[in-house]
Amino acid sequence: MKILISFWLVCLPLKHLKINSDYGYRIHPLTGKYAMHEGVDLKARHDTVYAILDGQVRSTGYDDGLGVYIKLDHGEVASVYGHLSQILVGTNDSVAAGDPIGITGASGHVTGEHLHLSICYRHKYINPIKFLYELLKKQEHERQKFQSTPDPTFE
Ligand SMILES: [Zn+2]
């Protein structure tokens, strides 16, 4: 029997991904200052937010900048979801990739509703879109490999 292991199941944080503001240096829309944007802003309108990977809720709360936020732990990777209107999970809850964890909103320091997503790898911010794209590519590759290999127990 073939058992599918050793690759991460990854899910997009929203059903539809449209980037409002990319990761990297930018002029901040509210302060007008040139500064690092340590995440990506995704277009959203009262949308359900999904956990990108299996993990555990590290914290939830309110921050002046991020607004209502959720931080998830996935081992060496951590993900942060900001400007929410609702939190659907509690601290220390276990979550699976694709589990609904919150609802988008416009809380905190924003000009309009969107989802702010940050991803840390070994405590350093990385480009979330590149990270998700790489994992999705890997997942698709594994899935195809799995499907194209006939299961010996059924031959
Ligand atoms: Zn942002």
Image: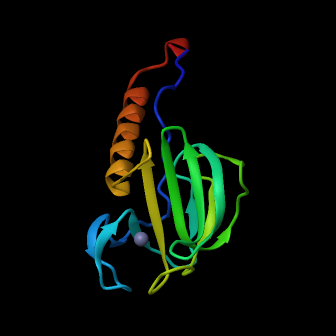
143 on left or right of 75: left
Q: Nearer the viewer, residue 88 or 110?
A: 110
Measured as percent of width and height from the top left, residue 5 is found at: 51, 25
Q: Nearer the viewer, residue 17 or 79?
A: 79
Q: Nearer the viewer, residue 28 or 114?
A: 28
Q: Is residue 108 above or below residue 54?
A: below
Tell me the residue at 63%/53% (across/down): 99
Q: In the rendered picture of this protein, how many numbered marks are placed on residues?
A: 0
Tell me the residue at 34%/43% (across/down): 137
Measured as percent of width and height from the top left, residue 40 is found at: 38, 65
Q: Nearer the viewer, residue 132 or 62?
A: 62
Residue 23, quarter of picture: bottom left
* Ligand 1 lies in quarter: bottom left
Tell me the residue at 49%/64% (across/down): 15
Q: Is residue 142 above or below residue 50?
A: above
49 on left or right of 129: right
Residue 26, quarter of picture: bottom left
Q: Is residue 84 above or below residue 77?
A: below
Where does the N terminus fall, quadrant-wise?
Answer: top right
Tell me the residue at 42%/34% (across/down): 143
Q: Is residue 15 above or below residue 10?
A: below
Measured as percent of width and height from the top left, residue 31 is found at: 36, 85
